[in-house]
Amino acid sequence: MTTLLQNDQFRLAARPVGLPKPSDWNAVNEPVRAIADGEIVVKTLYLSLDPAMRGWMNEGKSYIRPVAIGEVMRAGGVGVVVASKSPKFAVGDHVSGGIGVQTYWVGAADDKTANFYRIDPRVAPLTTWLNTLGMPGMTAYFGLLDVGQPKAGETVVVSGAAGAVGQTVGQVARHLGCRVVGIAGGKDKCDFVVNELGFDACIDYKNGDVREGLKQHCPNGVDVYFDNVGGDILDTVLTRINMKARIVICGAISQYNNTTPVKGPANYLSLLVNRARMEGIVVFDYAPRYKDGVAALAKWMQEGSFKSREDVVKGFDNFPDALLMLFEGKNFGKLVLQVAEA
């Protein structure tokens, strides 16, 4: 059966300079090979599009090796097992893992890179397993709790508040009894963050002054800042932090497509003055605890006190353009590419 299937792939053709362009990709079509004992074939249903993907395209040392030229572009996704010669997964199982930007994944069921695990579409929609119950949710949950260490009554500020990680950070902080202030781009996103997600306030960096917004909405300063954007916004928040504040460095989307060196924090001495701490979060470090995070977030969702918003783009061929939406601020919620009907 598998030999009749055709696998469409996007492979990295060149290291981008600035925003990825069409010539950085090579579209490939090849037959799905027959599987051996212990192997499975996974049909891709949805792919997760994340800002981190831009960093994976660069050469150089990082927390994960770069995607090699000629290699299928790395991406998380959810799919369904359509062929199996492994006792680990049965045909019809829904799984999540490192599928890559392709319509089928083929290999060992226990492949450590793909790291597939079974998911239950009865608990939440499949797209939610790429958002709140997936890597973004785990990043937010463990990054805030373990690195940010918020306490009830403290003020938590999160940039990229309407995005995949930001929306979960704010809602977790709210459940912990914190004052939560978001930073997002545009009135619609700020309204969503406040009216739908329950943030106390949201600063519109596109149509307002972030410094003035922080003065207005964080009159007692900032205890925890969860940073998804870097650049000028990070610098501005550092001027408002309290004694013993915690700054969680999750991402720097404002810097990913720079053609000049990444801009570091100019106001880092505020860490010294306030005896504050800045620490990075890489979600893979928490893999042994994912089940705990999923259980906690799923419980809140089932109680109706936690929301998950996904922005779904349809069509595998739309991958190059859809990825750019992340860096143009066009996505509203977690960006997901629908590859096939579930």
Image: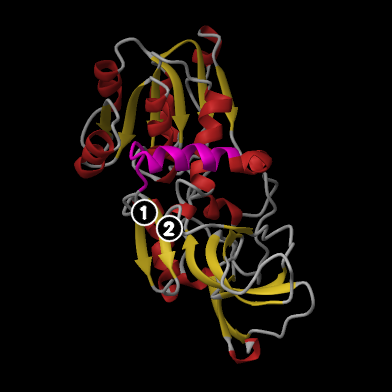
| Mark 2 surroundings within 10 Å by alpha-carbon count, few (fewer than 14), some (14 through 19), many (20 or more) | many
Q: Could you tell me the amino acid type at mark 2?
A: Thr
Find the distance from the CA under tag 2 to the CA under tag 1.
7 Å
Q: How many numbered marks does the figure carry?
A: 2
- Asked if the residues shown at circle 2 and circle 1 are in contact, with their CB atoms under 8 angstroms apart, the answer is yes
Q: Is residue 188 above or below residue 195?
A: below
Q: Residue at x 58, y 67 (%)?
A: 93
Q: Is residue 254 magenta?
A: no
Residue labelled with disc 1: 310
> What color scheme is it?
secondary structure
Image x and y of residue 22, in percent: 46, 71
Residue labelled with disc 2: 127
Image x and y of residue 80, in percent: 55, 70
Res 127 quadrant in image: bottom left
Among numbered discs 2 and 1, the one appearing first in the sequence: 2
Q: Residue at x 53, y 61 (%)?
A: 77
Q: Is residue 39 above or below residue 154?
A: below
State the quadrant of the C terminus.
Answer: bottom left
Res 214 quadrant in image: top left
Q: Could you tell me the amino acid type at mark 1?
A: Glu
Image x and y of residue 332, in percent: 31, 51
State the quadrant of the N terminus.
Answer: bottom right
